[in-house]
Structure formats: C-alpha cells, structure tokens
Image: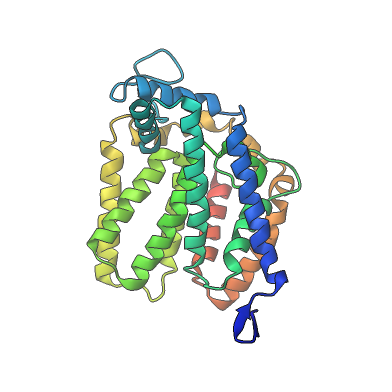
C-alpha cells in the first residue's frame, strides 16, 4: 500500500522489508563470488574452461586425458572458454564472471517471470526470498537447486546460468502465447530451450516441463497458427540439439542408469530438505481452486509426476 502526503506518494516502511531482505540475499551471493569457494564440481568447470582455452575446436575430455566428447562442453562453457582465450583472464576470474552473469540472469529472470503473473511491487522480492529460503530446515547442496546455501556453492556453475535463462524463457513464452507472436519469437524460444538443455541437462528438463505448463495453462487457449509456431520452435530446438558438435545430446538419454546411485540422496529426508516448501503447495492449492489450468499448478503437477516416476 502507498500513502500520499502532500501530493507525494510514499511507500510505507514495512512494504520495503521484502525488498531489503532480497537485496541482502543478493549481496551475500556477490560476496560469495569474490570468495568463490573451492567445493563440489568447481574444479571440473575450471578444467573445462582450461581445455577450451587451449583448443576451442578439439578440447578433449576435461575429466581424463582422452580425445572424447563431454557434456561439459555446452554453449555457455564454450563462450567462457573463448572469453578466457581472447582476454587472457585467469580461469577463476572467468568463473567469477560466469557467477556474476548467472546471478544477474537469475534475479532478472525471476522478476521477468513473476511480472507475467502480477505487477504488484512486493511480489518480485517475495518470490526471490521464497526461492532462496523456502526449502527445508536442513542444509542441502545440489547443483540446480536454488536454496541460498546450495546456490552459494554453485553460483559459478552452468546450472545457475541455465536456471536464469529458464526463467526468462518461461516469461518470453508466456508473452508470446498471450500476444500470438510471430515466427521469429517462437524460433528464438526454440534456440533458448536448446541452450538450456545443452548447458545443464537436468535444469533443461525442468525448463521443458515449465514450457509445457505455460502452453497448457495459456489463456486464451492458443490458436492453430500459434501452436504451429510452437511446433516450429520445438523443431528448431531439436535441430540445435542434434547438430551440437561437442557431444551427442540424445546419447545421454540412455545414460540415466549410471546416475541413479548418485541422485539417490535427492529422494531421502524429504521433509528435512524440502519441508518448508509445503507452504508453497498450500498457495498452489488456492490457485488451483481459482483456475484448474493455472500454469504454476500444472508445472508443479508435472514435476511431482516426474519425481514419482524416477
């Protein structure tokens, strides 16, 4: 609520609290970028950039001394490797640049996506705070998860870039569906979708579910011409995936069995890791009562089904 005093509209101090808290969280992430903690897969991503700096066309495998393809060579890491080669910047300086870009994409992406649902001033900072803090009482670190502690360790990873890109992708898709945009927009969205999938495959799956939810929940329902453009963007995205020269994306579809043990911890201690997110489920139930085709509800249902199947 805003208060008018002598012709000047002022925001009550309590309304500024979410903005201040969200800015504090972002500031903490910026301090982490300065420190760039050596943990998790940071060494792998550093090795990837070093290989691309040495030879952008035939980098070899970043994990072993072999000339084999690797899914770590994505459009994002290729850009970072070219930046390192062109500027001579140190690998960890480049990773700090990656972290800055990732945080900027993530914060602006959340704001972009949220504004497609509501234009109220307090919604965006509240969304940032929920994404960073509304997880569980126990610390949980995993690439692609937005908990503040997890993001502090993975802020320079490709997963952060892919998450920020995904939020912008969903927002642009909602706008394109709403305005019946032309072919150029939907073809560009197809390329963005492919870049997210190539940059971090697991986040790309989430981006895909989100895109499907935005289409299924679009109001008014897209006409035949718009759905044809959606199909065209999808076809272009598949083409980019098929033509990516650094590794075969579709070969990864058969590699899931070897990752089961690694990801088993995602299915344990659910209340400890995700218990606070149940507040969000209550909010989704309220949205579902108002609209059975609410995109966020459909998104949650698709994610829950995937979790149950996996």
Is residue 14 at all visible to an observer of this figure? yes
Percent x, y of residue 263 = 59, 35
In front of the other: 236 or 46: 46
Residue in view at x 52 percent, y 46 percent: 103
Q: Which of the 4 quarters of the picture holds residue 239?
A: top left
Give the number of callouts.
Answer: 0
Quarter containing the C terminus:
top right
Determine the image quadrant of residue 183. Answer: bottom left
In the shown orientation, is residue 226 left or right of residue 6? Answer: left
Q: Would residue 116 be found to the left or right of residue 179 on screen? A: right
Q: Is residue 153 above or below residue 2?
A: above
98 and 226: which is toward the camera? 98
User: Which residue is depicted at the point 72% across and 49% down?
Assistant: 136
The quadrant of the picture occupied by the N terminus is: bottom right
Horizontal and vertical percent position of residue 238: 29, 46
Q: How is the image coloured?
A: rainbow
On the image, the x and y values in percent for residue 149 come to 67, 42
Q: Residue at x 51, y 59 (%)?
A: 299
Residue 237 coordinates in the image, percent (x, y) = 30, 48
* In the rendered image, the vertical position of residue 39 relative to residue 218, given as above or below: above
Hey, which residue is sitting farthest bottom in the picture?
6
Q: 296 or 62, which lies in front?
A: 62
Q: Single out the residue that lies furthest toward the front.
A: 6
């Amino acid at each position: 609520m805003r208060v008018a005093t002598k012709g000047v509209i002022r925001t009550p101090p309590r309304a500024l609290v979410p903005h201040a808290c969200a800015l504090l969280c972002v500031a903490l992430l910026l301090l982490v970028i300065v420190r760039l903690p050596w943990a998790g897969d940071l060494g792998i991503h550093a090795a990837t950039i070093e290989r691309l700096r040495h030879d952008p066309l035939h980098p070899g495998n970043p994990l072993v001394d072999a000339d084999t393809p690797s899914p770590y060579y994505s459009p994002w890491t290729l850009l970072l490797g070219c930046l390192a080669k062109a500027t001579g910047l140190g690998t960890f300086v480049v990773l700090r640049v990656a972290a800055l870009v990732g945080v900027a994409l993530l914060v602006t992406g959340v704001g972009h996506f949220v504004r497609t649902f509501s234009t109220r001033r307090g919604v965006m900072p509240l969304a940032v705070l929920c994404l960073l803090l509304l997880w569980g009482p126990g610390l949980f670190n995993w690439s692609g998860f937005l908990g503040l502690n997890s993001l502090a360790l993975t802020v320079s990873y490709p997963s952060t870039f892919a998450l920020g890109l995904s939020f912008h992708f969903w927002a642009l898709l909602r706008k394109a569906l709403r305005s019946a945009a032309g072919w150029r927009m939907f073809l560009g969205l197809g390329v963005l979708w492919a870049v997210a999938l190539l940059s971090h495959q697991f986040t790309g799956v989430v981006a895909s579910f989100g895109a499907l939810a935005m289409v299924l929940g679009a109001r008014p329902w897209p006409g035949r011409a718009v759905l044809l453009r959606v199909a065209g963007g999808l076809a272009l995205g598949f083409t980019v995936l098929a033509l990516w020269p650094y590794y075969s994306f579709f070969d990864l579809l058969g590699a899931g069995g070897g990752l089961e043990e690694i990801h088993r911890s995602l299915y344990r201690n659910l209340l400890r890791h995700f218990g606070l997110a149940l507040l969000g489920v209550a909010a989704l139930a309220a949205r579902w009562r108002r609209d059975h085709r609410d995109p966020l509800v459909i998104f949650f249902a698709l994610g829950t089904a995937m979790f149950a199947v996996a």
